[in-house]
Amino acid sequence: MPHTDPARAQLPEPATVRSRVRIPLAFPDGYRVEAEVFTFHGLTDGAEHLALAIGEPQGTPLVRLHSECLTGDVFGSARCDCGPQLRESVERIAEAGGYLLYLRQEGRGIGLYNKLDAYALQDSGLDTYQANTALGLPEDGRDYTAAAQMLATLGATGIRLLSNNPDKAGQLGRLGIDVAERVPTGVHLSDSNVRYLRTKADGTAQTLGHGIELLKVGA
């Protein structure tokens, strides 16, 4: 079943491709693949988002919207599952053909410093959403209009979305991107991120739950 929203909006004005360059990707476990990286002019939020074409995108490509996470993606922090999700997504897209959109939305859109401030509050007992609220910030401040622009520019207006997050599919649908299928990612559970993942799985009235099932570490 498609996950588009009946209250459809028009596609936003398409962006234009600013540059494209091939970059070999390498991960700590030895996995390597080549990507064609696109940059853009005219994105609505003015941020320097990237689209990585991996494998052979055609038909209904597999697409991952990955929000930047410096601590997880670069430094390997185990407080979240972002780094393992990025690694998994690249390989699955390489096999199926599609795009990884790397979106500059650190901390679900609140920024790096605010995310670290929220971590400090989490250490005192708040969950990730409660910590954002205590700082006067949204539970999830991400907007995917620029992502829809990028996909439209690349000709990918009908996609398979690699995500556990129903809000991503809902926003893309309202922005005119046909999400033919939402494909779940794996659950990368560890002792350090179990509370974070449980909170994400349950969601809130605003963020919705991610529909993932948590097993004990090592199960």
Image: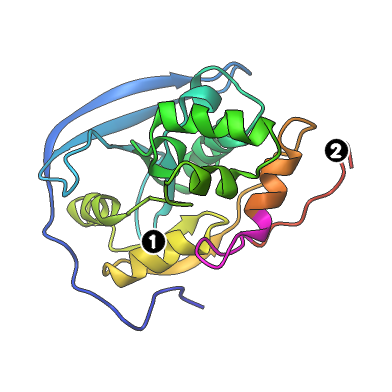
User: Residue 48 is drawn in which quadrant?
Assistant: top left
Secondary element at image label 2: loop
Q: Residue at x 37, y 50 (%)?
A: 142
**Coloration of the structure image:** rainbow
Numbered range of the magenta stretch? 201-210
Counting labels gives 2
In the image, residue 2 sits, relative to residue 105, either above or below, namely below
Q: Is residue 219 toward the left or the right of residue 123 in the image?
A: right
Which residue is under mark 1? 159
The residue identified by callout 2 is 217
Amino acid at pointer 2: Val
Residue shown at 31% from the left, 71% from the top: 174
- Label 1 secondary element: strand
Disc 1 to disc 2, C-alpha distance: 33 Å
Counting residues from the start of the chain, the first of labels 1 and 2 encountered is: 1
Whether residue 204 is in magenta: the answer is yes
- Identified at 56% across, 42% down, the residue is 131
Tell me what residue is drawn at x 22 percent, y 56 percent: 155
Residue 121 drawn at (x, y percent): 60, 34
Disc 1 marks a residue whose amino acid type is: Ile
Q: What mark, if any, has residue 43 been given in the picture?
A: none
Q: Please identify, in this view, whether the residue under mark 1 or under mark 2 is nearer the observer.
A: 2
Residue 17 vertical position relative to residue 22 in the rendered view, above or below: below
